[in-house]
Structure formats: structure tokens, C-alpha cells
Image (cartoon, helix red, strand yellow):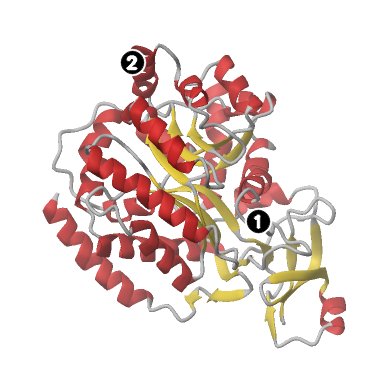
Amino acid sequence: MLLVGNGKVITQDKDMPYIENGCIAVKDNVIIEIGKTEDIKTKYHYREFLDAKGKVIMPGMVNTHHHIYSAFARGMPSKSSVPKNFTQILEGLWWKIDKALNLEDVKYSAYTTYIDCIKNGTTTIFDHHASQGAVRESLFTIGEVSKELGVRSCLCYEVSDRDGKDVMEDAVSENIEFMKKANSLEDDMLRGMFGLHASFTLSDETLYKCVEEKSNINGGFHIHTAEGIDDLYDSLKKYGKRVVKRLMDFNILGEKTIAVHCIHVNDGEIELLKETKTNVVHNPESNMGNAVGCSPVIEMIKRGVLLGLGTDGYTSDMFESLKVGNIIHKHNLCNPSVAWTEMPQMLFENNRKISSEYFNKPVGVLKEGAHGDIIIVDYNPLTIMNENNYDAHILFGMSGRNVETTIINGKVVMKDRKLVDIDEEKIYEKSRELSSKLWDRI
């Protein structure tokens, strides 16, 4: 029995959103009760009490779109000409990296990204992987690292035609084999989806193959959707239809599918996303960095589309994504009143809903029956914090670097900013060695 208490508890549970001096009781990996610290301590015989010392206790963050494979790009010198658009960024950076990665690179990209997640309070991630030079066993490699470090994950491999038929078929097989394995596990820590890169790198023949191969396996697709304008132009030119319509015609949309970005979508496509109950994940920092445009997130929410929040590999800090999401739509719409409620809803409510399509017990919330994914944030509010204004305190006062303790599945994986049973320096030393060799190969 683990008790986490003596802190200001933000539950993200509408039935009991805030407790001034609260405590969470976790048995094995599940929350069994939440209440006032003195009441919970009196009621339960506990093995360990984590004293938050008046700091903030929150649910672990959920990231519904990440890219572990991008880890070794940090600080890499560019050998390409200066990109003028998103397609040139893909060709000059990301598609060069994914071709050069080997399985050891993939392993240490996973180690370092998962450590970053833990240190920023992100306890569940949906990752979209690519390592075209090392397709087979790549998801299983990442899955082993996620198990070792204890981070809840839903993984997929991006199928694409850009590197030929053999690589495409390997990617299909990797998805299928991993989904069968991960979705049969009972511990609710690892799941699989079927990854697709994007419409403009997928032929009709390949999409038919992917849909057919996945037809008897439970789970949805995870695909970049109308991220860059070239994706839209390609679909119109080759197939005479817009991207979302093309995906719908292949039966790719649906309540278990994640359509990432959805920047260049029109009213008709938004309606298709709503009607099919497709999940859309917004990645504001990445979109701004790639200069691909601003997704019509506010309009999609108004129209009833379920919008989640991710980082697209840009960061592992969901507090950052929340902050940037809050301002990009104000700026884009020239309206300072938007995004105040939409961004917290996306991060704390909708990411949980998306996760519920894959994990049996709730994540991203502190309530009875949810997984024991808990963070303690070193934050001392300089103004009154209560159930009516804690979103503003999260937005303006907290960041991932304020996370002091991270608990996943009832296990303490970081305490007082120190990782538990993880040799961070050894991992980072190896990561620097491997990334340097990768840079030389590109």
C-alpha cells in the first residue's frame, strides 16, 4: 500500500476536482481511495507514505502523439541546404535519420525519451515510430525499454512507400506482429496501433494491404493527416479527393484511429471526422516549428470532434504543449478569449478518452479505479489556488521541470528529481556515443 499525501490534489475528476490537503491510496497499481490526508492515513495500514509537503499532486500526463525515433536529432549539424518548406524538412532531416537508425540507436532513443518523459511527468505516451533501416523488431525493442523503465505506452510503426516495397511490407508485418503481442498482455502497460506515415507517401495498393492485414485485429490506425499543404495537393492531384475523404474511403477513420494534425482540412472533412468519431491530435509547437499552418482546433471542437494534445517529438513536456496551444489559437484567430477551456480539455479530458480505447483502466485522472499514475509538482502558489482556478495555475505557474516525483502504475520511478533504479548517466553516455556515430553516417 502506497499513500501519496499532504499536498494540494488536482484530480482532473469532475466529481471531486480539488482537495486542499489530500491523499491518494494506491494498492498494487490501482487507486483505491482519495480523501483528506488525515482520514486516509488513519484508515489504511500503509507501507510507504510519500509526503508532498504542501506541493501539488496531479495525475501523470498523457501524450497522444510522440516520436521516440527523433531523439538523436537534437543538436545534429545539418548537411542539407536550408529547407524552404515542410517537405524539404522531411527529406533533409527526418527521412535521413530514420534510414540511418539501427536497433541499438532505436533502443537508446527509447531510453532517453522515456527518461525525458519521466522527468517531465509524462506517464503515458502514444508513439509513432520510424527506422527504415531497422524496421523488424523495432517496436519490440521500444516495448522492452518501456517495460524496463516502467512507462505506459501505445506503439506503432509508420508504413510508407518511400523506401520501396520490401521496407513497406516489413513495416506492415512489424505492426501486425506487435499489435498481436502487445494487445494480448494483461498488465495494461503496453499496447499497439497500426501506424501509417501520411497519405502522400502511401499508394492505394499499400492502403488496401494495410486495411486488409489489420482487419481481424482490434485497434485503430495512427496517421499524420493533412499536416503539410503538399499532403493535400498530392491527394487532390492523384486521387481527386481531399486527404480525410481518401482515408474515409479506405475505412481508416474511426473511434480507435488517431488522425494527427489535421491542419489543411475543410468543413466537409471536419464533419467526416466527427461522424466517424475519429480522434484528432493537435501538436502546436511542432506545427509552428515546421511552419505548416495552424490547425482549426477551435472550430473542430465546436463541431464535436474529439481533440487530444501531443508533442510530435518536439518535447516530452506536456506543460509546454499546453502553454503553446493556449497562445497559438489566440494569435491565429486574433481572439484573446479562445483556448482557455479548450486546451485543458484536450490535455486532461480528451487524452484520457483517447487512452481509454486502448487501456482498460483510466489514466490521466486521480480517482478510484484509475491506474496509479501520479506526479508531485514543486509549485507554491503565490495567489489562492482552488477548484475554480487551478487550470490557470497549471498554465502560468508549472512546467515539466517542476515535477519532483513521478509514480507510474503504483511504482515510484522518480523521487526528488532522482530516477529510481535507472542509471541515467550511463544511458546518456551511451546515447552520446551512438548519436555521434549516427551523425557521421548521415
Kind of element beneath mark 2: helix
Is mark 2 in CB contact (under 8 Å) with mark 1? no
Image x and y of residue 255, in percent: 62, 37
Left or right of residue 245: residue 411: right
Image x and y of residue 229, in percent: 38, 21
The answer to whether residue 157 is visible is: yes
The answer to whether residue 334 is visible is: no
Residue nearest the observer in this picture, 118 or 144: 144
Left or right of residue 130: residue 384: right
Residue beneath disc 2: 238
> Hey, which quadrant is residue 177 in on the image?
bottom left
Q: At label 1, which amino acid type do we have?
A: Gly
Q: Residue at x 57, y 69 (%)?
A: 406
Residue beneath disc 1: 364
Crowd band around label 2 with a 10 angstrom C-alpha radius: few (<14), some (14–19), many (20+): few
Q: Residue at x 42, y 39 (%)?
A: 286
Crowd band around label 1 with a 10 angstrom C-alpha radius: few (<14), some (14–19), many (20+): many
* Pointer 2 or 1: first along the chain: 2
Q: Work out how far the residue at label 2 is from the one at label 1, CA to CA, in angstroms.
A: 41 Å
Q: At label 2, which amino acid type do we have?
A: Lys
Left or right of residue 425: residue 102: left
Residue nearest the observer in this picture, 9 or 53: 9
Kind of element beneath mark 1: loop
Q: Residue at x 15, y 34 (%)?
A: 81
User: Marks 2 and 1: which is nearer the front?
Assistant: 2
> Hey, which quadrant is residue 40 in on the image?
bottom right
Name the disc covering residue 144, or none: none
Quadrant including the N terminus:
bottom right
294 vs 61: above or below: above
Left or right of residue 334: residue 15: right
Image x and y of residue 411, in percent: 59, 76
